[in-house]
Amino acid sequence: MQPFLILASLSAIILCGSFFIADGDFAPDNCPLRAVVVLKEDGVGAKCYGYVEFCQSYQSYEPVFMQLNIYGLSPGLHGMHVHEKGDLRQGCNSTGGHFNPFNNKHGDRNAQFRHLGDLGNIVADGSGRAVYQLDDRLISLHGDYSILGRALVIHEKEDDLGLGGNLESLKTGNAGRRVACGIIGKL
Ligand SMILES: [Cu+2]
Ligand SMILES: [Zn+2]
């Protein structure tokens, strides 16, 4: 093995802690806290489906790792958020707004201020698939602000991340209709 590769592998191990095996593959069996959301399309055109797995340590300040397995999107960017309510009685529309217990404005996943549920955009490839890993430092699977029992929503359009220059941008990111959603359940 080349020295560079050894270094790269070592840093991957350090960065990813015990939740990923060395080559970066998601290893949910190693997670003390796990959750899954099964996404179902909401009859607004896109035949979006799939699931997202979540994993986190028992400490609330540890990031949550996500494995996306989402299909049937239009190629490109789509807003993804945790919405407040795990209520699908009117489909994705009854899940409320973005989960926002601290009363912030809408923003990017990496923004200093954002709704707790703001996970930015996911990227669908030319075949409409978003199958990759993501992590977030703010959402949590336990504690007072847990996302368990709330909804994960995938949107029709790109989230403008609060930079759209209008009121709706600071509320929803102008991400358009809710093409798929599901309730985040504990594993
Ligand atoms: Cu949303
Ligand atoms: Zn938001």
Image (cartoon, rainbow, N blue to C red):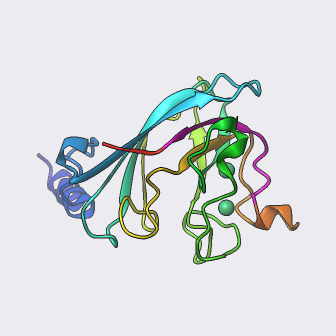
Residue drawn at point x = 47 percent, y = 57 percent: 147
Near-viewer residue (84 or 152): 84
Name, please, the residue furthest toward the left.
Answer: 1
Residue drawn at point x = 86 percent, y = 68 percent: 165
Asked if residue 179 is among those painted magenta in the image, a careful observer would answer yes
Name, please, the residue furthest toward the right.
Answer: 166
Name, please, the residue furthest toward the front.
Answer: 89
Asked if residue 147 is among those painted magenta in the image, a careful observer would answer no
Residue range in magenta is 172-183
Q: Position of residue 97 (x, y in %)?
A: 69, 56
The quarter of the displayed image where residue 23 is located: top left
Q: Is residue 158 above or below residue 8?
A: above
Q: Is residue 123 above or below residue 134?
A: above
Residue drawn at point x = 58 percent, y = 28 percent: 40
Residue drawn at point x = 77 percent, y = 67 percent: 170
Q: Position of residue 69 (x, y in %)?
A: 45, 33
Near-viewer residue (28 or 182): 182
Q: Is residue 72 above or below residue 115?
A: above
Please state if 128 lies on the left or on the right of 141 as rendered: right
Q: Is residue 37 above or below residue 141?
A: above
Near-viewer residue (187 or 155): 187
Q: Position of residue 56 (x, y in %)?
A: 30, 57
Please state if 33 lies on the left or on the right of 2 as rendered: right
Does the image show residue 180?
Answer: yes
